[in-house]
Image: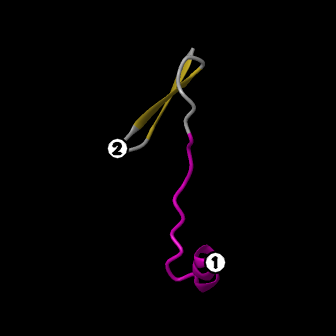
Amino acid sequence: METRVSSATKEVVIGDDQPTVLIGERINPTGKKRMSEALKS
């Protein structure tokens, strides 16, 4: 069995016979001074 996850630009196949896939979100610290400083350190 396989599962397909897609966005507007990319599709990822998840299944027992597929390689490990990392799925996550990008962080946009624009306008967030505390988060921006934490990412720099």
Residue 9 is tagged as 2
The boundaries of the magenta stretch are 22-41
Residue 10, above or below 4: below
| Residue at x 60% of width, y 18% of height | 16
Question: Closer to the camera, 18 or 2?
Answer: 18
Q: Position of residue 25 (x, y in %)?
A: 54, 55
- Who comes first in sequence, dot 1 or dot 2? 2
> What is the CA distance from the residue labelled 1 to the residue labelled 2?
32 Å
> Which residue corresponds to mark 1?
41
Tell me which secondary structure the magenta stretch mostly adopts. loop
Which quarter of the image is occupied by the N terminus? top right
Residue 10, above or below 1: below
| Residue at x 56% of width, y 49% of height | 24
Q: Amino acid at mark 1?
A: Ser
Give yes or no for residue 32 being in the magenta stretch: yes
Q: Amino acid at mark 2?
A: Thr
